[in-house]
Amino acid sequence: QVQLVESGGGLVQAGGSLRLSCAASGRTFGSLTMGWFRQAPGKEREFLAAISRSGGRTSYADSVKGRFTISRDNAKEMVYLQMNSLQPEDTAVYYCAGDTVPGRYNYCGQGTQVTVSS
């Protein structure tokens, strides 16, 4: 079992930045591919970014490419999402997720709210 706890959400003005953090426990963190997702009210959950076990490979959704950066610290068992140039349409609950199988994401946190005001 893996426990994931997100933090760092909040209210920010358009054009601002936030850094989300996700703390993992319960399994060897280095065995997990990690990702970030978000879900806005009335919309389906959206994939944002993924990072390989070593952190050497990342991928991004087109909607956030160039604005968001995913990173991880395996020694601290943490994954991060640096979000820049935030816009009101980025308002959502943001989740980190992971799995031993790339792309599967069976483990998911409770989410952290990000609200971007115009």
Image (cartoon, rainbow, N blue to C red):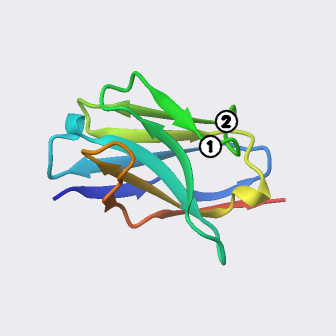
Q: In this orientation, does residue 9 appear?
A: no
Label 1: how many Cα within 10 Å (few below 14, some 14–19, many 20+): some
Task: Classify the position of the N terminus by image quarter.
Answer: bottom left
Rendered location of residue 77, percent (x, y): 26, 39
Q: Nearer the viewer, residue 13 or 92?
A: 92
Q: Is residue 12 above or below residue 113?
A: above
Residue annotated with mark 2: 65
Q: Residue at x 36, y 61 (%)?
A: 109
Q: In this orientation, does residue 64 appear?
A: yes
Residue at the far bottom in the pictured view: 42
Which amino acid, mark 1? Answer: Ala
Rendered location of residue 80, percent (x, y): 45, 40
Residue at the far right in the pictured view: 118
Q: Is residue 78 above or below residue 2?
A: above
Label 2: how many Cα within 10 Å (few below 14, some 14–19, many 20+): few
Q: Nearer the viewer, residue 69 or 65?
A: 65
Mark number, residue 61 = 1
User: On the rendered structure, is 117 left or right of 93?
Assistant: right
Q: Nearer the viewer, residue 79 or 1?
A: 1
Q: Residue at x 35, y 54 (%)?
A: 105
Q: Is residue 77 above or below residue 105?
A: above
Q: Nearer the viewer, residue 56 or 12?
A: 56
Circle 1 — which element?
Answer: loop
Q: Residue at x 35, y 60 (%)?
A: 108
Which amino acid, mark 2? Answer: Lys
Q: Residue at x 34, y 57 (%)?
A: 5
Q: Is residue 17 above or below residue 113?
A: above
User: On the rendered structure, is 109 left or right of 61?
Assistant: left
